[in-house]
Image (cartoon, rainbow, N blue to C red):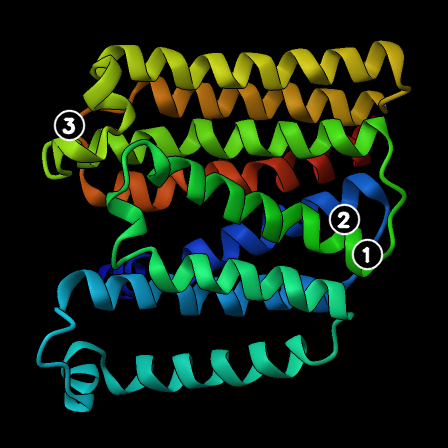
């Protein structure tokens, strides 16, 4: 059982579910559903994270096709192949503007492990903009959602949320990341970075309260955002160097799923 859990988490299968859940939560909030986008979010995330995983461990120099088979197990290669096929089939069905956005994202994904990741300050913001674009922006253009104040605030909230839950991973990696990368822990310090992450979530919550008071946000949505704030803040507060990889890759990542979970629960009972 332990082996299966590790495969589920460290194969990037779980993070793909997290991005898909974030995408579905946006559709829930906007009442604009498109299951193809959810599927694309899952398959493309699974591909991109394993792409990063592979090239973070294997140098470009002297690359051989056999390196892929040495790095990934046969079941993983099959899953990656399936993900690529489905991603491509879904991609060609999207509107031209959606395809353009995906191509821009793909360029970020491709160059990220080679040099973008090393650029000062950019690492966490590239992740946040990629997750926000995948989970919010693609839906807006593909479904022709009218972009009003509430939609813009939803974009800002998602960006802040992803920034907040990404900082614990910078805290995990800060002893290994180059100082030249200038991640939050390198610039502001370990404890201050946790406070900044909580600060992002406080702004996220503040915007939600504003939406409830001024823009007719549903009470069930507000309660779900409050619960998401509490759960995510708790995970950030208990983050430490002593936590194992499973804590970050399973529990911290689960903050992304918590939005959808609380949206469903509060909509049932409120």
Asked if the residue under mark 1 is in contact with the one under mark 2, i.e. CB atoms within 8 Å, the reply is yes
Residue underneath mark 3: 241
Q: Is residue 8 visible?
A: no
Q: How many marks?
A: 3
Asked if the residue under mark 1 is in contact with the one under mark 3, i.e. CB atoms within 8 Å, the reply is no
Name which residue lies at 19% across and 86% down: 69
Disc 3 secondary structure class: loop
State the residue in front, 223 or 52: 52
Disc 1 secondary structure class: loop
Give coordinates of residue 162: x percent, y percent. 50, 35
Q: Quick one: label 3 or label 1, which is nearer the N terminus?
A: 1
Between the C-alphas of marks 2 and 1, the distance is 5 Å
Q: Quick one: label 2 or label 1, which is nearer the N terminus?
A: 2
Between the C-alphas of marks 3 and 1, the distance is 40 Å
Q: Is residue 250 visible?
A: yes
Give coordinates of residue 8: x percent, y percent. 35, 62
Residue underneath mark 1: 33
Give coordinates of residue 153: x percent, y percent. 73, 26
Name which residue lies at 90% across and 43% down: 146
Disc 2 secondary structure class: helix
Residue 180 relative to residue 250: left or right: left
Q: Tell me the number on the disc at residue 27.
A: 2
* Crowding near the residue tagged with mark 3, few <14, some 14–19, many ≥20 C-alpha atoms within 10 Å: some
Q: Is residue 265 above or below residue 195?
A: below
* Crowding near the residue tagged with mark 2, few <14, some 14–19, many ≥20 C-alpha atoms within 10 Å: many
State the residue in front, 121 or 237: 121
Q: Quick one: label 2 or label 3, which is nearer the N terminus?
A: 2
Residue 150 relative to residue 112: left or right: right
Image quadrant holding the N terminus, namely bottom left
Give coordinates of residue 149: x percent, y percent. 84, 26
């Amino acid at each position: 059982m332990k082996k299966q859990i590790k495969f589920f988490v460290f194969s990037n299968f779980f993070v793909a579910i997290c991005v898909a859940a974030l995408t579905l939560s946006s559709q829930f909030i906007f009442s604009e559903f498109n299951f193809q986008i959810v599927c694309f979010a899952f398959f493309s995330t699974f591909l991109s994270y394993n792409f990063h995983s592979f090239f973070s461990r294997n140098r470009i120099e002297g690359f051989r096709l056999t390196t892929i088979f040495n790095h990934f197990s046969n079941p993983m290669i099959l899953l990656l192949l399936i993900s690529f096929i489905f991603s491509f089939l879904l991609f060609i069905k999207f509107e031209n503007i959606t395809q353009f956005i995906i191509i821009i994202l793909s360029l970020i994904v491709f160059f990220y492990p080679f040099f973008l990741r090393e650029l000062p300050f950019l690492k966490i913001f590239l992740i946040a903009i990629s997750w926000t674009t995948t989970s919010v922006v693609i839906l807006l253009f593909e479904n022709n959602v009218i972009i009003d104040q509430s939609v813009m605030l939803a974009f800002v909230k998602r960006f802040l949320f992803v920034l907040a839950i990404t900082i614990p991973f910078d805290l995990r990696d800060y002893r290994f990341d180059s100082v030249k990368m200038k991640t939050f822990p390198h610039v502001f310090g370990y404890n201050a970075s946790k406070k900044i992450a909580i600060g992002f979530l406080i702004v996220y919550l503040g915007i939600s309260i504003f939406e409830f008071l001024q823009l007719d946000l549903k009470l069930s949505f507000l309660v779900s955002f409050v619960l998401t704030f509490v759960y995510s803040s708790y995970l950030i507060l208990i983050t430490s160097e002593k936590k194992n990889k499973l804590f970050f890759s399973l529990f911290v990542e689960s903050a992304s799923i918590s939005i959808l979970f609380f949206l469903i629960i509060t909509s049932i009972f409120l």
